[in-house]
Image (spheres, helix red, strand yellow):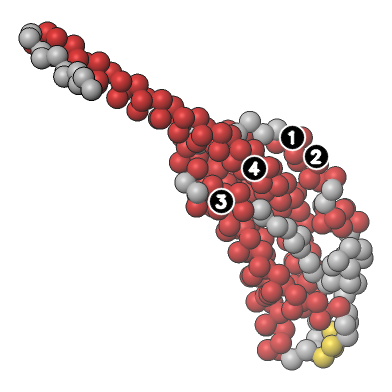
Amino acid sequence: MEVHRPKPVHHWREFLKEVGIIVLGVLIALGAEQSVEWLSWRAKADQAQTQLRHDAAGILDDMLERLAIQQCQDRRLVLIRNRLLASGPRWTGMAPFYTSGPPAGSTYAHPMRGWPRTSWATAVASTVAMHLPGDQLDDYAHIFAAAEREANDQATEHEDSSELNVLGDPLTLTPDQKVTFLRIVEAERARNRVMADEAQNSLDYFKALGMDLDKARAASIENSLAYQTCVANHLA
């Protein structure tokens, strides 16, 4: 069998030419690999953006509802506070704040919202978030961090404010019991303000993502049992 030996390189020019061909081939291969990887991440980022935007829209709806009812919730709490301050030991039960929906019969209640954050947790865990455009990454990071805080405040709000529901019944209240209720009322007023402020301070990030706040606000109010309750109680 005849073996073909590589031809010796007689000139530096030929040597450099062969090296250049090899280097060019390697660069083309690397470039193709990087292009495939970039396209793969781009597809993942596009899919993540769709999910992030969907969850962000849900958070926007929750925040706009909190803004719409902030004064109403505060007025209800002030009404409870004033009744406590004016009452003697004999407490006459208050008429319920909500008369329909899951909170029906509650002396005081607030919206219970989901504050969706799964898409953000997934995007961060998979590192796909790092492939979002820089401005969008910053906007989504602020939105979902705010949603996390709102969800935590809501959980505390629900646990504490539920204690006010006993004020719907006739009671004999000691001075210490009245002080306890008054503390709950003031804590809920403060938390209600904080949640509304959090929502207000987040609106610019939704705007930056191109969301129509006026349209979202109208839809939020239309579908809000809490807002309808405020209107029915003449507190909106």
- Label 4's element? helix
Q: Is residue 183 above or below residue 211?
A: below
Mark 1 Cα-neighbour bin, 10 Å: few <14, some 14–19, many ≥20 = few
Residue for point 24% across, 20% down = 22
* Left/right of residue 15 with respect to residue 140 in the rendered view: left
The circle on residue 214 is 1
Give the secondary structure at mark 1.
helix
State if disc 4 and disc 1 touch (CB < 8 Å): no
Which residue matches tag 2?
218
Q: Which residue is mark 3?
A: 122
Mark pair 1, 3: CA separation: 29 Å
Q: Amino acid at mark 3?
A: Thr
Amino acid at the residue labelled 1: Asp
Checking the image for residue 51, the label placed there is 4
Q: CA distance from mark 3 to mark 4?
A: 10 Å
Q: Residues within 10 Å of mark 3 (few under 14, many from 20)?
A: some
